[in-house]
Amino acid sequence: MGGLIRIASAEKSDFPALVRIWTASFDDTERDVIRFLNFFYSPGSSLLLFENGKPAAAAHLISGSAVAGLIGPDGLPMRKPEITCAYLYAVGVLPEFRGRGYGAAVSRRAAEHSRETGADICVTVPADSGLYKFYKKNAGFETAFYAKTVDARLCGNTDGYSVLSISPDEYSDRRENLLAGRPHLRYAPRWSEYFTTICGAGGGLFEIKDHSTGEAALAAVESDMDRVILKELLCRGGTKKFLEAAAGFFHKSRVTARLPGGNEPFAMASQALSRSVYWGIAFD
Protein backbone atom coordinates (compact mmCIF):
# COMPACT_ATOMS: atom_id res chain seq x y z
CA MET A 1 0.00 0.00 0.00
CA GLY A 2 1.10 3.55 -0.62
CA GLY A 3 0.33 6.84 1.11
CA LEU A 4 -2.05 7.51 3.98
CA ILE A 5 -4.91 4.99 3.87
CA ARG A 6 -8.36 5.52 5.37
CA ILE A 7 -11.53 3.45 5.01
CA ALA A 8 -14.82 5.11 5.88
CA SER A 9 -18.55 4.77 5.30
CA ALA A 10 -19.63 6.60 2.17
CA GLU A 11 -22.06 9.49 2.39
CA LYS A 12 -24.57 10.49 -0.27
CA SER A 13 -22.17 13.23 -1.26
CA ASP A 14 -19.73 10.43 -2.18
CA PHE A 15 -22.04 9.00 -4.87
CA PRO A 16 -19.94 10.45 -7.74
CA ALA A 17 -16.84 8.68 -6.37
CA LEU A 18 -18.76 5.42 -5.93
CA VAL A 19 -20.04 5.67 -9.51
CA ARG A 20 -16.57 6.41 -10.87
CA ILE A 21 -14.99 3.42 -9.09
CA TRP A 22 -17.83 1.06 -10.09
CA THR A 23 -17.92 1.98 -13.77
CA ALA A 24 -14.12 1.74 -13.98
CA SER A 25 -14.25 -1.77 -12.49
CA PHE A 26 -17.33 -3.34 -14.09
CA ASP A 27 -19.24 -3.27 -17.36
CA ASP A 28 -22.08 -1.17 -15.94
CA THR A 29 -23.31 2.30 -16.78
CA GLU A 30 -23.69 5.27 -14.47
CA ARG A 31 -27.43 4.72 -14.66
CA ASP A 32 -26.99 1.11 -13.47
CA VAL A 33 -24.96 2.21 -10.45
CA ILE A 34 -27.35 5.00 -9.45
CA ARG A 35 -30.24 2.54 -9.66
CA PHE A 36 -28.39 0.16 -7.32
CA LEU A 37 -27.57 2.94 -4.85
CA ASN A 38 -31.17 4.20 -4.89
CA PHE A 39 -32.35 0.69 -4.02
CA PHE A 40 -29.82 -0.33 -1.41
CA TYR A 41 -27.85 2.62 -0.07
CA SER A 42 -28.19 3.42 3.61
CA PRO A 43 -25.67 4.96 6.03
CA GLY A 44 -22.86 2.43 6.41
CA SER A 45 -23.85 0.26 3.46
CA SER A 46 -21.04 1.45 1.17
CA LEU A 47 -17.39 1.80 2.11
CA LEU A 48 -14.74 3.96 0.47
CA LEU A 49 -10.99 3.51 0.74
CA PHE A 50 -9.03 6.75 0.43
CA GLU A 51 -5.35 7.18 -0.37
CA ASN A 52 -4.09 10.57 0.75
CA GLY A 53 -7.69 11.80 0.76
CA LYS A 54 -8.49 10.57 -2.76
CA PRO A 55 -11.15 7.86 -3.30
CA ALA A 56 -9.39 4.73 -4.58
CA ALA A 57 -11.57 1.69 -3.87
CA ALA A 58 -15.09 0.82 -2.75
CA ALA A 59 -17.26 -2.04 -1.54
CA HIS A 60 -20.98 -2.35 -0.93
CA LEU A 61 -23.00 -4.36 1.60
CA ILE A 62 -26.59 -5.43 0.89
CA SER A 63 -28.64 -6.30 3.97
CA GLY A 64 -31.88 -8.25 4.28
CA SER A 65 -30.76 -11.84 3.75
CA ALA A 66 -30.30 -14.84 6.03
CA VAL A 67 -29.28 -18.47 5.81
CA ALA A 68 -32.34 -20.53 6.71
CA GLY A 69 -32.92 -24.26 7.18
CA LEU A 70 -29.47 -25.19 8.46
CA ILE A 71 -29.13 -28.69 9.92
CA GLY A 72 -26.64 -29.49 12.68
CA PRO A 73 -24.23 -32.44 12.82
CA ASP A 74 -26.90 -34.44 14.69
CA GLY A 75 -29.29 -34.10 11.78
CA LEU A 76 -31.61 -31.74 13.69
CA PRO A 77 -32.36 -28.10 12.90
CA MET A 78 -29.89 -25.63 14.37
CA ARG A 79 -30.90 -23.86 17.58
CA LYS A 80 -30.64 -20.52 15.85
CA PRO A 81 -33.18 -20.75 13.01
CA GLU A 82 -31.47 -18.20 10.77
CA ILE A 83 -28.02 -16.71 10.32
CA THR A 84 -28.27 -13.10 9.18
CA CYS A 85 -26.07 -12.06 6.26
CA ALA A 86 -24.62 -9.01 4.59
CA TYR A 87 -23.94 -9.48 0.88
CA LEU A 88 -20.55 -8.06 -0.13
CA TYR A 89 -20.97 -6.73 -3.64
CA ALA A 90 -19.15 -4.77 -6.34
CA VAL A 91 -15.69 -4.47 -4.79
CA GLY A 92 -13.84 -2.15 -7.16
CA VAL A 93 -10.55 -0.27 -7.42
CA LEU A 94 -9.70 2.62 -9.73
CA PRO A 95 -7.10 1.59 -12.35
CA GLU A 96 -4.45 4.02 -11.13
CA PHE A 97 -4.60 2.52 -7.62
CA ARG A 98 -4.54 -1.19 -8.52
CA GLY A 99 -1.79 -3.53 -7.40
CA ARG A 100 -1.59 -1.98 -3.94
CA GLY A 101 -3.85 -4.40 -2.05
CA TYR A 102 -6.77 -2.00 -1.80
CA GLY A 103 -9.38 -4.51 -3.01
CA ALA A 104 -8.29 -6.92 -0.27
CA ALA A 105 -8.21 -4.15 2.36
CA VAL A 106 -11.70 -2.84 1.62
CA SER A 107 -13.07 -6.42 1.46
CA ARG A 108 -11.65 -7.24 4.90
CA ARG A 109 -13.00 -4.02 6.35
CA ALA A 110 -16.43 -4.65 4.80
CA ALA A 111 -16.58 -8.11 6.43
CA GLU A 112 -15.62 -6.60 9.79
CA HIS A 113 -18.12 -3.76 9.33
CA SER A 114 -20.93 -6.20 8.55
CA ARG A 115 -20.39 -7.95 11.90
CA GLU A 116 -20.13 -4.64 13.75
CA THR A 117 -23.49 -3.56 12.33
CA GLY A 118 -25.34 -6.73 13.29
CA ALA A 119 -24.90 -9.36 10.57
CA ASP A 120 -23.80 -12.83 11.69
CA ILE A 121 -21.75 -13.42 8.54
CA CYS A 122 -20.68 -11.70 5.35
CA VAL A 123 -21.31 -13.47 2.03
CA THR A 124 -20.20 -12.84 -1.54
CA VAL A 125 -20.48 -14.29 -5.05
CA PRO A 126 -17.03 -14.34 -6.72
CA ALA A 127 -17.25 -13.14 -10.31
CA ASP A 128 -14.80 -15.80 -11.53
CA SER A 129 -13.02 -18.89 -10.22
CA GLY A 130 -9.81 -17.02 -9.41
CA LEU A 131 -11.60 -14.82 -6.91
CA TYR A 132 -12.36 -17.79 -4.65
CA LYS A 133 -8.65 -17.90 -3.80
CA PHE A 134 -8.57 -14.10 -3.45
CA TYR A 135 -11.37 -13.95 -0.88
CA LYS A 136 -10.08 -16.96 1.04
CA LYS A 137 -6.54 -15.59 1.24
CA ASN A 138 -7.36 -11.94 1.87
CA ALA A 139 -10.62 -12.00 3.83
CA GLY A 140 -10.85 -15.53 5.26
CA PHE A 141 -13.95 -16.50 3.28
CA GLU A 142 -14.90 -20.14 2.73
CA THR A 143 -16.97 -21.65 -0.07
CA ALA A 144 -20.39 -22.28 1.45
CA PHE A 145 -23.04 -22.00 -1.29
CA TYR A 146 -23.52 -24.43 -4.15
CA ALA A 147 -25.85 -24.84 -7.12
CA LYS A 148 -26.46 -26.86 -10.25
CA THR A 149 -26.40 -25.31 -13.71
CA VAL A 150 -28.24 -26.79 -16.68
CA ASP A 151 -27.50 -25.56 -20.21
CA ALA A 152 -29.62 -27.24 -22.86
CA ARG A 153 -30.99 -26.79 -26.36
CA LEU A 154 -34.69 -27.53 -26.40
CA CYS A 155 -37.53 -27.50 -28.90
CA GLY A 156 -39.90 -25.79 -26.49
CA ASN A 157 -43.37 -26.94 -25.49
CA THR A 158 -46.17 -24.66 -24.33
CA ASP A 159 -49.11 -27.07 -24.74
CA GLY A 160 -50.89 -27.38 -21.41
CA TYR A 161 -48.66 -24.80 -19.70
CA SER A 162 -49.07 -21.18 -18.71
CA VAL A 163 -46.60 -18.53 -17.62
CA LEU A 164 -47.78 -15.83 -15.21
CA SER A 165 -45.81 -12.81 -14.02
CA ILE A 166 -45.91 -12.57 -10.22
CA SER A 167 -44.95 -9.89 -7.71
CA PRO A 168 -41.71 -9.89 -5.68
CA ASP A 169 -43.72 -10.47 -2.49
CA GLU A 170 -45.52 -13.46 -4.00
CA TYR A 171 -42.30 -14.86 -5.43
CA SER A 172 -40.53 -14.60 -2.08
CA ASP A 173 -43.38 -16.32 -0.21
CA ARG A 174 -43.65 -19.19 -2.71
CA ARG A 175 -39.86 -19.52 -2.82
CA GLU A 176 -39.74 -20.14 0.92
CA ASN A 177 -42.40 -22.84 0.61
CA LEU A 178 -40.50 -24.63 -2.16
CA LEU A 179 -37.20 -24.46 -0.26
CA ALA A 180 -38.58 -25.50 3.14
CA GLY A 181 -36.28 -28.07 4.73
CA ARG A 182 -33.32 -27.20 2.49
CA PRO A 183 -30.50 -24.94 3.69
CA HIS A 184 -30.83 -21.84 1.56
CA LEU A 185 -30.38 -18.10 1.41
CA ARG A 186 -33.60 -16.32 2.29
CA TYR A 187 -33.85 -12.74 1.14
CA ALA A 188 -36.28 -9.90 1.42
CA PRO A 189 -38.76 -9.15 -1.39
CA ARG A 190 -36.71 -6.02 -2.12
CA TRP A 191 -34.00 -8.27 -3.59
CA SER A 192 -36.58 -9.78 -5.94
CA GLU A 193 -37.90 -6.32 -6.75
CA TYR A 194 -34.41 -5.14 -7.68
CA PHE A 195 -33.92 -8.19 -9.89
CA THR A 196 -37.00 -7.23 -11.91
CA THR A 197 -35.37 -3.86 -12.69
CA ILE A 198 -32.13 -5.35 -14.04
CA CYS A 199 -33.33 -8.49 -15.83
CA GLY A 200 -33.98 -6.86 -19.18
CA ALA A 201 -37.05 -6.61 -21.39
CA GLY A 202 -39.08 -9.80 -21.25
CA GLY A 203 -37.49 -10.93 -17.99
CA GLY A 204 -38.89 -10.95 -14.47
CA LEU A 205 -40.42 -13.28 -11.89
CA PHE A 206 -42.80 -15.95 -13.17
CA GLU A 207 -44.88 -18.95 -12.26
CA ILE A 208 -44.80 -21.71 -14.88
CA LYS A 209 -47.79 -24.03 -14.42
CA ASP A 210 -48.44 -27.51 -15.80
CA HIS A 211 -52.23 -27.63 -16.03
CA SER A 212 -52.31 -31.39 -16.58
CA THR A 213 -50.88 -32.06 -13.11
CA GLY A 214 -51.39 -28.78 -11.27
CA GLU A 215 -47.64 -28.58 -10.60
CA ALA A 216 -45.97 -25.20 -10.74
CA ALA A 217 -42.41 -23.86 -10.85
CA LEU A 218 -40.93 -20.51 -10.00
CA ALA A 219 -38.56 -18.91 -12.49
CA ALA A 220 -36.43 -15.76 -12.24
CA VAL A 221 -35.90 -14.94 -15.91
CA GLU A 222 -33.24 -12.75 -17.47
CA SER A 223 -33.41 -11.70 -21.08
CA ASP A 224 -30.54 -12.51 -23.43
CA MET A 225 -30.05 -12.36 -27.19
CA ASP A 226 -29.64 -16.08 -27.90
CA ARG A 227 -31.12 -17.85 -24.89
CA VAL A 228 -33.42 -17.62 -21.90
CA ILE A 229 -31.52 -17.47 -18.61
CA LEU A 230 -33.29 -18.75 -15.52
CA LYS A 231 -31.32 -17.24 -12.64
CA GLU A 232 -33.37 -19.60 -10.53
CA LEU A 233 -35.78 -22.44 -11.31
CA LEU A 234 -37.60 -24.00 -8.36
CA CYS A 235 -40.12 -26.80 -8.44
CA ARG A 236 -41.03 -30.08 -6.80
CA GLY A 237 -40.26 -33.04 -9.02
CA GLY A 238 -38.75 -33.00 -12.48
CA THR A 239 -37.45 -29.82 -14.07
CA LYS A 240 -37.19 -30.82 -17.74
CA LYS A 241 -40.81 -30.07 -18.60
CA PHE A 242 -40.53 -26.59 -17.09
CA LEU A 243 -37.33 -25.95 -19.02
CA GLU A 244 -39.18 -26.95 -22.20
CA ALA A 245 -42.05 -24.62 -21.30
CA ALA A 246 -39.64 -21.74 -20.64
CA ALA A 247 -37.97 -22.30 -24.02
CA GLY A 248 -41.36 -22.19 -25.71
CA PHE A 249 -42.85 -19.19 -23.95
CA PHE A 250 -39.73 -17.05 -24.25
CA HIS A 251 -39.08 -18.14 -27.86
CA LYS A 252 -35.52 -19.41 -27.38
CA SER A 253 -34.01 -22.77 -28.28
CA ARG A 254 -31.34 -22.55 -25.59
CA VAL A 255 -32.05 -22.48 -21.86
CA THR A 256 -29.55 -21.95 -19.04
CA ALA A 257 -30.95 -22.53 -15.56
CA ARG A 258 -29.66 -22.45 -11.99
CA LEU A 259 -31.13 -25.14 -9.74
CA PRO A 260 -30.67 -26.23 -6.13
CA GLY A 261 -29.06 -29.55 -5.27
CA GLY A 262 -25.80 -29.34 -7.20
CA ASN A 263 -22.17 -29.28 -6.10
CA GLU A 264 -20.90 -26.36 -8.20
CA PRO A 265 -19.28 -23.68 -5.99
CA PHE A 266 -21.36 -20.54 -6.22
CA ALA A 267 -20.71 -18.23 -3.26
CA MET A 268 -18.62 -17.80 -0.13
CA ALA A 269 -19.13 -16.85 3.52
CA SER A 270 -16.91 -15.24 6.11
CA GLN A 271 -17.14 -18.43 8.15
CA ALA A 272 -17.66 -22.08 7.30
CA LEU A 273 -21.24 -23.36 7.47
CA SER A 274 -22.26 -26.81 8.70
CA ARG A 275 -23.92 -27.79 5.42
CA SER A 276 -23.75 -26.67 1.80
CA VAL A 277 -26.32 -23.95 1.18
CA TYR A 278 -28.31 -23.01 -1.92
CA TRP A 279 -28.22 -19.32 -2.89
CA GLY A 280 -30.41 -18.74 -5.96
CA ILE A 281 -30.81 -15.25 -7.44
CA ALA A 282 -27.63 -13.21 -7.29
CA PHE A 283 -26.85 -9.94 -8.99
CA ASP A 284 -24.09 -11.59 -11.04
Image (spheres, rainbow, N blue to C red):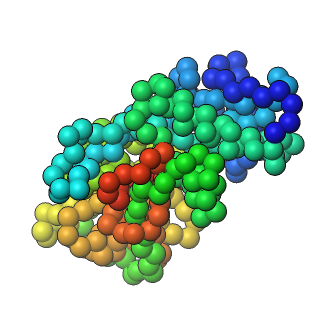
Between residue 118 and residue 262, name the one nearer to us.
Answer: 118
Residue at the spot 44% in from the left edge and 47% down from the top edge = 271
Residue at the spot 29% in from the left edge and 60% down from the top edge = 234
Q: Is residue 277 visible?
A: yes
Residue 126 screen position, x and y as percent: 57, 55
**Would you identify the image quadrant in which residue 32 lies?**
top right
Most extreme residue toward the front is 74
Q: Is residue 199 left or right of residue 247?
A: right
| Number of disc labels | 0
Residue 100 screen position, x and y as percent: 81, 44
Most extreme residue toward the left is 213
Residue at the spot 56% in from the left edge and 70% down from the top edge = 226
Query: Where 28 sits versus 190, above or below?
Result: below
Residue 196 screen position, x and y as percent: 45, 45
Residue at the spot 56% in from the left edge and 23% down from the top edge = 44
**Would you identify the image quadrant in which residue 246 lies?**
bottom left
Q: Is residue 162 left or right of residue 95?
A: left
Residue 162 screen position, x and y as percent: 26, 62
Query: Where 248 sits versus 60, above or below?
Result: below
Q: Quadrant of the N terminus?
A: top right
Q: Is residue 275 left or right of residue 236?
A: right
Q: Is residue 206 visible?
A: no
